[in-house]
Image (cartoon, rainbow, N blue to C red):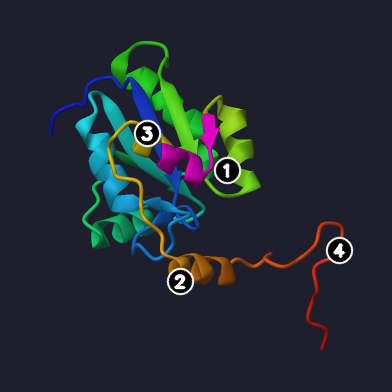
């Protein structure tokens, strides 16, 4: 096993709600395409973090033939940076993009000094860089996507309805 070169950029993806493994939801990151696009770039690492245990993340990614450079628990960002400093014997100095869909992802990104991107912002970034084509979303697909969004149709200021039994 050889040591990867020190990264210029690191991309960390939340798994649930962010990575799209089945091409059913165009508002999420297309996992396989994103992985393949980032692997073409020099000295770029691709990994995931989640509330799931590392072995669970590895199993899910393996099921879709994605081999991350690393997997983390969300609370391990500072340990990750310290490990890279220790292994490469230099201060941590690379740009880290954290792609997530929850406020928790944004908060962890800020805590560790990472750049936070929403899924559509990352997807647009790799489209704009020419790594993947812009998807053509049919009217039917757009309706299906909107139908599965839990807050669709709610108005600002109105409390969310809760089931009362």
According to the picture, the residue beneath numbered tag 4 turns out to be 158
Q: Nearer the viewer, residue 82 or 10?
A: 10
According to the picture, the residue beneath numbered tag 2 turns out to be 140
Compare marks 4 and 2 and give the one earlier in the sequence.
2
- Residue sitting at 63 percent across and 45 percent down? 104
Look at the image and tell me whether residue 93 can be seen: yes
- Residue sitting at 24 percent across and 47 percent down? 67
The reply to whether callout 1 and callout 4 are in contact (CB within 8 Å) is no
Compare marks 1 and 2 and give the one earlier in the sequence.
1
Q: Locate residue 60, reporting x and y percent.
A: 33, 60
The reply to whether callout 1 and callout 3 are in contact (CB within 8 Å) is no
* Foreground disc of the pair 4, 3: 3
Left of 48 or right of it: where is 107?
right
Give, as a single range, the part of the protein colored magenta. 115-124
In space, the residues marked 4 and 3 are separated at their CA atoms by 37 Å
The reply to whether callout 4 and callout 3 are in contact (CB within 8 Å) is no
* Residue at the extreme front of the image, as rendered: 139
Look at the image and tell me whether residue 72 can be seen: no
Q: Secondary structure at mark 4?
A: loop
- Residue sitting at 54 percent across and 34 percent down? 116
Q: Main secondary structure of the magenta part?
A: helix
The reply to whether callout 4 and callout 2 are in contact (CB within 8 Å) is no
In space, the residues marked 1 and 3 are separated at their CA atoms by 24 Å
Compare marks 4 and 3 and give the one earlier in the sequence.
3
Q: Quadrant of the N terminus?
A: top left
Indicate whether residue 116 is drawn in magenta: yes
How many badges with numbers are in the image? 4
The reply to whether callout 2 and callout 3 are in contact (CB within 8 Å) is no
According to the picture, the residue beneath numbered tag 1 turns out to be 105
* Foreground disc of the pair 2, 3: 2
């Amino acid at each position: 096993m050889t040591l990867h070169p020190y990264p210029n950029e690191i991309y960390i993806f939340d798994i649930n709600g962010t990575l799209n493994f089945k091409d059913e939801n165009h508002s999420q990151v297309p996992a396989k395409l994103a992985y393949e696009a980032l692997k073409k770039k020099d000295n770029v690492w691709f990994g995931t973090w989640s509330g799931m245990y590392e072995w669970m993340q590895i199993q899910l990614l393996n099921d879709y033939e994605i081999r991350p450079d690393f997997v983390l628990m969300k609370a391990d960002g500072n340990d990750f940076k310290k490990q890279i400093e220790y292994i490469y014997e230099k201060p941590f100095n690379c740009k880290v993009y954290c792609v997530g869909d929850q406020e928790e992802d944004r908060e962890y990104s800020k805590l560790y000094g990472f750049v936070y991107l929403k899924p559509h912002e990352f997807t647009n970034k790799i489209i704009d860089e020419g790594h993947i084509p812009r998807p053509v979303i049919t009217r039917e697909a757009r309706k299906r996507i909107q139908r599965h969004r839990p807050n669709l149709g709610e108005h600002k200021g109105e409390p969310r309805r809760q089931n009362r039994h």
